[in-house]
Image (cartoon, helix red, strand yellow):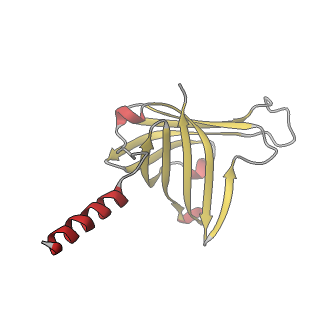
């Protein structure tokens, strides 16, 4: 009887360790659809981590939009370009989402050398938070880095 009690206790302890207070859901086009605002972006290159967003002292915003088949993003300074370093980035394309495997096909981008490239990421949605993590690699530009972006849904 004791081995059975120990086994039950062990199984209970293991299941308690696996529970989570904030479940992560598989993303779906329906759950992804809408507007999301970037709150943080980390870039990891050759083991070095840089916080790429928000940029200290820079007033800008980045929004990413999704529908069932397409995505788009834009980032711009909130000073209407009246700053020493105006910011305006934009891009769009199609995507494929299977479970949490998300593939972007960047068709349009103000950085034209980034156009017509495919990027593979993992997506996770928890409540109103979207996390996108994966590798951006473009051999011709010597780009090979991991990005971790966190967005919140705009209501």
25 or 38: nearer the eye?
25
Residue 88 placed where, x, y %?
70, 38
44 above or below 108?
below
Residue at the (61%, 72%) spot, across then down: 47
Residue 105 placed where, x, y %?
44, 47
Q: Which residue lies most toward the bottom here? A: 3
Residue 147 placed where, x, y %?
56, 57
Residue at the (62%, 51%) spot, across then down: 41
**What quarter of the picture does the N terminus occupy?**
bottom left
Q: Quadrant of residue 30?
A: top left
Q: Quadrant of residue 59?
A: top right
- Please count the marks in the image: 0
Residue at the (44%, 42%) spot, across then down: 126
Q: Which residue lies most toward the top here? A: 155
Left or right of 47 on screen, residue 120: left
Q: Which residue lies most toward the left here? A: 1
Q: Which residue lies most toward the front here? A: 1
Residue 11 placed where, x, y %?
24, 64
Left or right of 20 on screen, residue 6: left
Residue at the (36%, 49%) spot, across then down: 100
18 or 119: nearer the eye?
18
108 or 33: nearer the eye?
33
113 above or below 110?
below
């Amino acid at each position: 009887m004791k081995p059975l009690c120990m086994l039950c206790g062990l199984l209970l302890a293991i299941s308690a360790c696996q529970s989570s207070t904030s479940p992560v859901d598989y993303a779906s086009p329906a759950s992804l659809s809408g507007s999301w605002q970037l709150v943080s972006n980390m870039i990891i290159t050759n083991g070095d981590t840089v916080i790429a967003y928000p940029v200290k002292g820079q007033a800008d915003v980045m929004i990413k939009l999704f529908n069932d088949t397409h995505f788009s993003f834009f980032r711009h300074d909130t000073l209407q370009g009246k700053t020493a370093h105006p910011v305006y980035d934009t891009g769009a394309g199609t995507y494929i989402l299977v479970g949490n495997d998300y593939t972007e096909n960047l068709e349009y981008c103000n950085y034209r050398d980034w156009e017509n490239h495919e990027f593979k990421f993992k997506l996770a949605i928890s409540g109103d938070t979207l996390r996108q993590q994966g590798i951006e690699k473009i051999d011709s530009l010597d780009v090979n880095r991991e990005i971790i972006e966190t967005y919140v849904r705009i209501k």
